Structures are given as structure tokens and as C-alpha cells.
Image (cartoon, rainbow, N blue to C red):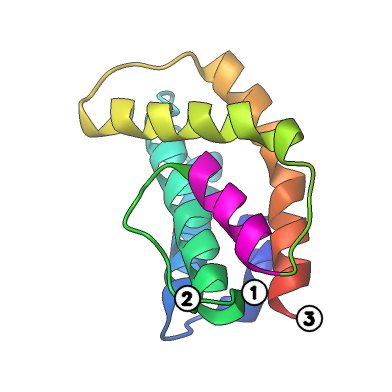
Amino acid sequence: MYTEKLAHFKNAKNLGGKAWEHAVMIDFAEQSEIEDCAMHCFHFQQLFELLFKHLLETKSKYGAYPRTHKLNNLLVQLVEQSEFKTDIDKYEAHLTAITVCAEAYRYNFLIDCKVYRKDVAILTPLIDELMAFAVS
């Protein structure tokens, strides 16, 4: 599903292409028997981070992105520095949760998969918004 959403960036030699690679890994994780959803979260966070940074690099007035890994900050910058518009309040807390759970993966902490899946359900439409903006 995520591979299809980011098909525009399939094997692209840029940050969008890297986001697509993480989409491939998310789809793999969803089809595997892995019970711990932390790996899924790590790739989900990376997908968003790289997609935000690609859009900041290619569609913002400054043509650059910050070093931050905080997804909520990247979304705010994208809205402020480009023509992309969305309801930041709808996504901000969920992007923060994804940033935090990706850290849990790096340090081998278990996360609450039920809560994580709710964040994913809320954030998945944002991917569609971002991709529509990317190809416009």
C-alpha cells in the first residue's frame, strides 16, 4: 500500500526515492510475522522525515531542510515555507508520537502497538496530501 502511495519516487536518486525505499520496508513489515511494531514505526518515521525533507528541498522558498528528525517541526516548516496547506493541529501530536516511537526502536524498547496503529491510521491520509503536493 505505501509502496503504491509513493510510486512516483520509485528508485529515484533523491530523498523522495529514499522515502519510497522505507515504504517498501513498511509493506514488508505489514506482510511479515513480526509482532513488534517498532520496526514498522522506524520506517514510518523515516518515510515521513525524508518526504518532508524532499519537499522542503524542492518546493520551499529556501530550497533547504533542517537537520531535525522531529516530524511535527518539519510539517510546520513545510506549511510555512511552501504552498502546501493542511490542518497542522490534526497531525501534530501524532507526528510527535511517531518521532518518539522511532526512538524506542533505536533503543530496543517495546511500544504499544494498538496506540501506534491509531497514529498510523490518522497519519496515512497525510501521505496522500504530501504526494499530491509533490507531483503538482
What residue would you read off at disc 1?
A: 7
Give left or right: position of 135 versus 15: right
What residue would you read off at disc 3?
A: 136
Query: What residue is rendered at 31% in x and 31% in y?
Result: 103
Categorize mark 3 by other alpha carbons within 10 Å: few (<14), some (14-19), many (20+): few
Query: What residue is rendered at 75% in x and 70% in y?
Result: 133
Residue 81 colored in magenta in the image = yes
User: SS class of the residue under badge 3?
Assistant: loop
Give how far apart the Cα atoms at labels 3 and 1 are. 15 Å
Q: What's the amino acid at mark 3?
A: Ser
When the figure is inspected, residue 68 is found, relative to residue 119, above or below; the finding is below
Residue 27 colored in magenta in the image = no
The label number, if any, that marks residue 87 in the structure image:
none
Query: What residue is rendered at 51% in x and 26% in y?
Result: 97
Range of magenta residues:
72-82
For the residues carrying marks 3 and 1, which lies nearer the camera in this image? Answer: 3
Categorize mark 2 by other alpha carbons within 10 Å: few (<14), some (14-19), many (20+): many
Q: Position of residue 86 (x, y in %)?
A: 78, 50
Give left or right: position of 93 versus 63: right
Give left or right: position of 46 versus 116: left
Q: Are marks 3 and 2 in contact (CB under 8 Å)?
A: no
User: SS class of the residue under badge 2?
Assistant: helix
Q: Earlier in the sequence, mark 2 or mark 1?
A: 1
What residue would you read off at disc 2?
A: 17
